[in-house]
Each structure stands twice: as C-alpha cells, then as structure tokens.
Image (cartoon, rainbow, N blue to C red):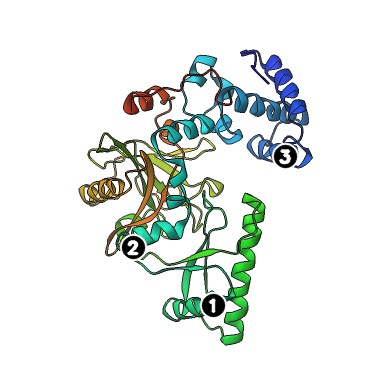
C-alpha cells in the first residue's frame, strides 16, 4: 500500500476500506471484525446490519487516512466532517509520531511502568505502593494487606484503566489471603493476554486515596482527578489544556467505558470552563448523579497543582510531553500516574481539531501525507 485515494464520498470510502481489509487480512481477521462490529453496534443501537457493516469499513478508512481510532471516529464526529476538518485533528496515530519527536521513545518505560513512576515520585504519590511479580513477593503483599484492608490493583504496564479495580481482604484468614494473592497474579496474567498479548503476572497495588471533600462531592464513589498535560519546550514548562475527570453511576474508575465526564479547565485560573462531556456525546453543566455544578467550578489549590506539575515535568527532561493525573487527597495533591502519550482529549471539549495549535507550540510539523508512510 503506497497511497490511498482521498474522497468525501461515503461509498468510495467503504470500497477503499474493503480493499485495505483484504490486503491486511491477517490483521482484519474474524475476531477483529467481530470486535469492531460489536463496538459500532453499541454506538449505533438502532442501526441496521448493513449500516453497522458499512460503518465498520468507514472506521477502517478513517484509521488509514487520518490515523483515527474507531473510538475517535465517533467522538470526534468524523462522519459529519469534511476532509479539511478531519485533517485538523491530532488523531491517535498522528499523536504517537508527534510525541516520538519531542520525547525519547526508549525512555517511555519510565511512565508506562507504574512502579518505575512511583519509585521516581514516591513523595508526590504520598501513599503506599508495592510491586508483586510472583509468589516470592507474597510476604510484601501480606505486610501491605496488614496495613491496608482495601486497596487498588493495577496491571504494571497497561493504560486506559484496563484491568484496574478496587478490592479488599478484610476478614480473610492466612489460607484465604494466600489464595487471594495467587488470584491477583492470575487475573493480571489474563489482562495481559487480553490487552497486550503478553503473559506477565505483575501487578502494582496501591493504598486508596482519601479524596478531599471538595472533589469527592461530584461523585463520591470515584477519585475525581485532574489531567494536567505538560509540555517541556526549551527548558520551560507549559501546562496545556488540562481537564477535570469525573466518575459516574457509582463506578470506582473514571473511564469512558463507564460514561465518565471530562470538562475543560482554564490553565491559568483553574476554573472549569466547559460543561462535562462524555465520549458518547452527552453534555452536562451539572453532574447527572449528584447535581453538582461543573461549569464554572474553581479547582481548589490550583497554583499549588501548577507548581507541582511543572516540577514533575522538569524532573523528566527526556519527555517533551507528559499527561499527569493528579488527585486531591485530604493531605494535598498527589500523583495518580503519568502518561507518556495520553489522549489529546481537549479536542473533544474544545469541539475542534487542534493539530496546528500543537504544531505551533512545539515548532514542528509531520511532513508526509499519511501517518504510515
């Protein structure tokens, strides 16, 4: 595949996508088509079978022409946009190339491995975190469980909330605790096989964050965090398009999988300046569960968070971009995690493509027609 014909004709897009799928049939195999079909069906519950099939092919076309994932196709409303408008977006595949330009790819493990991040920022995490790789680490887990009967389990190297859950060991005897631990490792292996096609039994276990009331009030069941993207340009840190992540419907995780809300935050003032939005297109000025006003909310201790974010960014000079997740505990701001190439979700809540804005900031532009060339 040397080139692709660009068109705004829907039927031509579908035909081109069918040719791509045939050429790359090892990737677009039966399980992949089932996965895409299920996702499209969830997004278009009233569509006919033919409409669903056509849309699957449209997502394939948009992936190879614009670098957009099947999710981005929907939440950026690419079906309604012109070629010029779609080109203005920093999509998944484009984002990776821009991040690779401004960050050292070989150092990505520092942030993709949650325990490595914790070791570098132990003070900023401000809670107990352990790494468990095998049965040999059971004594470490046992000591941790003796202090914390409830905790969060995270696969060591996955992102997007995959495999993350809250659990506990209250009331377990010694034999039950050992069985619980072995099951933790087994579940981690299953998550690795499902999402990363690996087979590691490795988990990071974290003390629960005791969330401050000011943010807990929006949705008490989840830790409602702030994503703070930092750009390190010529030694200077710029905080760019932060957002508020708010849980929903009683779920512990803030994730698009559970309809969580995101809302834009003004980087200078810390005031939430958009309504809360979901990737499925819902918009809420106030939280749908708790009715707390989102638009106009002042994120507390904002200057403190800006200083902390900038300091963390300066300590990782190999990364031109980091997407930090911070939570406000009753003791102050703390790191939840850092992301080497997190999603540029500001294009969702700003409702426009912002590739040129990012190019102007970093002083570089990708010089090729398609991301895969």
Q: Circle 2 sits in a helix, a strand or a loop, which is it?
A: helix
For label 1, the crowd category at 10 Å Cα-Cα, with few meaning under 14, some 14 to 19 and many 20 or more, is: some
Query: Residue, x 38% and y 64% (percent of image)?
Result: 209
Mark in front: 3 vs 2: 2
Q: Pick whichever of labels 3 and 2 is earlier in the sequence.
A: 3
For label 3, the crowd category at 10 Å Cα-Cα, with few meaning under 14, some 14 to 19 and many 20 or more, is: few
Q: Is residue 259 above or below residue 210?
A: above
Q: Circle 1 sits in a helix, a strand or a loop, which is it?
A: helix
Q: CB of mark 3 within 8 Å of CB of mark 1?
A: no
Q: Specify the label residue 52 is tagged with.
A: none
| Number of dots carrying numbers | 3
Query: Residue, x 45% and y 81% (percent of image)?
Result: 146
Distance from label 1 to label 2 (Cα)? 22 Å
Q: Is residue 221 visible?
A: no
Where is residue 171 shown, x and y percent of the image?
A: 53, 83
Where is residue 221 shown, x and y percent of the image?
A: 45, 60
Q: Specify the label residue 138 is tagged with.
A: 1
Q: Is residue 58 above or below residue 228?
A: above
Q: Is residue 3 above or below residue 197?
A: above
Q: CB of mark 3 within 8 Å of CB of mark 2?
A: no
Q: Pick whichever of labels 1 and 2 is earlier in the sequence.
A: 2
Where is residue 89 shown, x and y percent of the image?
A: 47, 25
Q: Nearer the viewer, residue 334 or 269?
A: 334
Q: Nearer the viewer, residue 27 or 211?
A: 27
Q: Specify the label residue 32 is tagged with.
A: 3
């Amino acid at each position: 595949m040397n080139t692709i014909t660009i068109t705004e004709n829907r039927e031509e897009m579908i035909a081109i996508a069918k040719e791509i799928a045939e050429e790359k049939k090892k990737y677009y195999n039966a399980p992949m088509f089932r996965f895409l079909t299920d996702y499209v069906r969830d997004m278009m519950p009233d569509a006919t079978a033919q409409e669903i099939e056509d849309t699957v092919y449209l997502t394939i076309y948009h992936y190879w022409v614009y670098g957009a994932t099947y999710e981005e196709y929907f939440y950026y409303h690419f079906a309604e946009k012109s070629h010029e408008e779609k080109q203005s977006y920093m999509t998944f595949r484009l984002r990776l190339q821009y991040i690779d330009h401004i960050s050292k790819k070989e150092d990505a493990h520092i942030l993709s491995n949650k325990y490595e991040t914790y070791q570098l920022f132990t003070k900023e995490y401000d809670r107990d975190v352990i790494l468990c790789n095998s049965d040999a680490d059971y004594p470490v887990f046992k000591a941790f469980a003796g202090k914390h009967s409830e905790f969060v389990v995270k696969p060591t190297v996955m992102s997007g909330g995959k495999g993350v859950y809250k659990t506990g060991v209250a009331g377990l005897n010694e034999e039950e605790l050992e069985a619980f631990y072995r099951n933790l490792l087994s579940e981690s292996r299953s998550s690795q096989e499902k999402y990363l096609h690996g087979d590691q039994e490795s988990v990071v276990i974290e003390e629960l964050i005791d969330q401050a009331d000011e943010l807990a009030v929006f949705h008490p069941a989840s830790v409602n965090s702030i994503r703070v993207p930092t750009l390190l340009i010529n030694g200077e840190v710029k905080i760019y398009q932060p957002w508020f992540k708010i849980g929903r419907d009683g779920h512990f995780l803030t994730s698009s999988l559970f309809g969580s809300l995101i809302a834009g935050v003004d980087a200078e003032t810390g005031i939430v300046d958009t309504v809360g939005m979901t990737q499925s297109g819902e918009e809420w000025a106030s939280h749908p569960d708790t009715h707390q006003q989102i638009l106009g909310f002042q994120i507390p201790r904002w200057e403190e968070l800006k200083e902390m974010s900038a300091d963390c960014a300066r300590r990782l000079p190999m990364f031109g971009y980091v997407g930090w997740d911070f939570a406000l505990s009753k003791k102050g701001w703390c790191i939840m995690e850092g992301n080497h190439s997190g999603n540029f979700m500001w294009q969702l809540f700003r409702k426009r493509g912002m590739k040129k804005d990012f190019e102007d900031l970093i002083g570089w532009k990708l010089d090729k027609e398609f991301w895969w060339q």
